[in-house]
Amino acid sequence: MNISLNKSESYQSKFASRIAARLNDSTDHLPHDISERLKAARMQAIAQRKVVKLQTVPVISVGGNAAVMHLGGYHPNLWNRFASLLPLVALIAGLLAISSLQEQNRTEEIAEVDAELLTDDLPPAAYTDPGFLRFLNVQGQD
């Protein structure tokens, strides 16, 4: 992108030089009063000229598996800072939401296991009895 901008500036510069040369060649044949009026007009035009500010063109840098877009000069202001912090805030909010949902799922699973244990035919103390564990192992081997 910078290459095309430099070429465009060089073409404009060459064109302006040719026009200025043609105008200077023609002024040699003008009467003195007209050349003085033109000189005064040039001075006024130079004094009132507007400074043209070139806008920066976004540049895309590609490296590896990522592409990054650079916007000319960096001018930190409130909106730029807010925009740069917004993804971080969204990430933190997402992580908190995921953590809350996982905690809720764990609580529901524990409540479901407790409900199964309490509504089972066997009392909860039977599961802690070592004899019951041997009974289950022997039943599983048969």
Image (cartoon, rainbow, N blue to C red):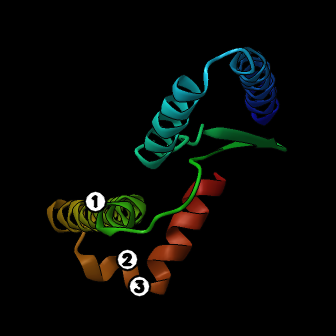
* Label 3 close to label 1 by CB (< 8 Å): no
- Which is nearer the N-term, disc 3 or disc 1? 1
Q: Residues within 10 Å of mark 3 (few under 14, many from 20)?
A: few
Secondary structure of the residue carrying tag 1 is helix
10 Å crowding of disc 2: few (<14), some (14-19), many (20+): few
Taking depth in this image into account, of 84 and 110 the one nearest to the observer is 84
Q: Are marks 2 and 1 in contact (CB under 8 Å)?
A: no
Drawn side of residue 52 relative to residue 4, left or right: left
Q: What kind of residue is marked 2?
A: Tyr
Q: Is residue 45 above or below residue 106?
A: above
Where does the image place residue 70, in percent across and percent down from the top left?
Answer: 62, 48
Type of residue at label 3?
A: Asp
Q: CA distance from mark 2 to mark 1?
A: 31 Å
Measure the C-alpha gap from mark 3 to mark 1. 35 Å
- Label 2 sits on a secondary structure element that is helix
Question: Residue flagged by tag 1: what amino acid is it?
Answer: Leu
Reading the image, the residue beneath label 2 is: 127
Q: Whole-percent x and y of residue 121?
A: 20, 61
Q: Disc 3 designates what residue?
A: 129
Counting residues from the start of the chain, the first of labels 2 and 1 encountered is: 1
Q: Is residue 129 left or right of residue 79?
A: right
Q: Secondary structure at mark 3?
A: loop
Q: Kindly identify which residue carries mark 1.
A: 101
Looking at the rendered image, the quarter that the N terminus falls into is: top right
Q: Residue at x 50, y 75 (%)?
A: 133
Disc 1 packing (10 Å; few <14; some 14–19; many ≥20): few
x then y, percent, for residue 86: 35, 60
Nearer to us of marks 3 and 1 is 1
